[in-house]
Amino acid sequence: LLKKGACVSCHGDNFAKPIDPAYPKIAGQYADYLYVALKSYKVDGKNVNVGRSNGVMAGVAKQFSNAELKALANYIATVDGDLQTIPQSRFR
């Protein structure tokens, strides 16, 4: 699935070294967040207020079923990366 989507070509080695600083580091991101984000790229464009707008990611996400997107999200979440959860003393 990773080769089919060519994820590494933009998000970089280990999904933590993007080729452009504007691209997100996704290694270690929460699986649920990744899954929802990937699904939101598949929105058909009829409602501009729904989904995410990125032509490249839309083309990538549309070639996968939702089950495949879930599998990709689950795998990428297990990859070690720079992302961290920093505990806060209280909510603001």
Image: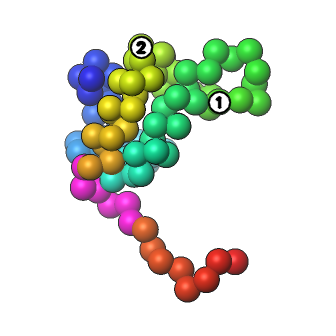
Specify the amino acid type for callout 2: Gln
10 Å neighbourhood of mark 2: few (<14), some, or many (≥20)? few
* Label placed on residue 66: none
Residue 25 in view (yes/no): no
Vertical position of residue 68 compared to residue 88: above or below? above
- In this picture the colour scheme is rainbow
Q: Residue at x 52, y 29 (%)?
A: 39
Residue 12 x, y percent position in the rendering: 29, 40
Q: Which residue is mark 2?
A: 63
Q: Magenta part of the protein: which range?
A: 79-84
Q: Position of residue 76 (x, y in %)?
A: 31, 42
- Kindly report the secondary structure that dominates the magenta region of the rendered protein: loop
Dots 2, 1 in contact, CB < 8 A: no
The reply to whether the magenta stretch includes residue 16 is: no
Residue at image x 45%, y 23%?
66
* Front in this rendered view, residue 69 or 25: 69
Sooner in the amino-acid sequence: mark 2 or mark 1:
1
Q: Is residue 82 left or right of residue 41?
A: left
Q: Tell me residue 4's x, y (percent).
A: 28, 18
Image quarter of residue 86? bottom left
Q: Nearer the viewer, residue 54 or 45?
A: 45
Dot 2: what SS? loop
> Is residue 61 shown above or below 91?
above
Residue position for label 1: 51
Separation of disc 2 and disc 1 at Cα?
A: 16 Å
Residue 10 appears at what percent x and percent y? 35, 34
Q: Residue at x 62, y 21 (%)?
A: 43
Dot 1 crowding, Cα within 10 Å, few <14, some 14–19, many 20+: some
Amino acid type, label 1: Gly
> Circle 1 — which element?
loop
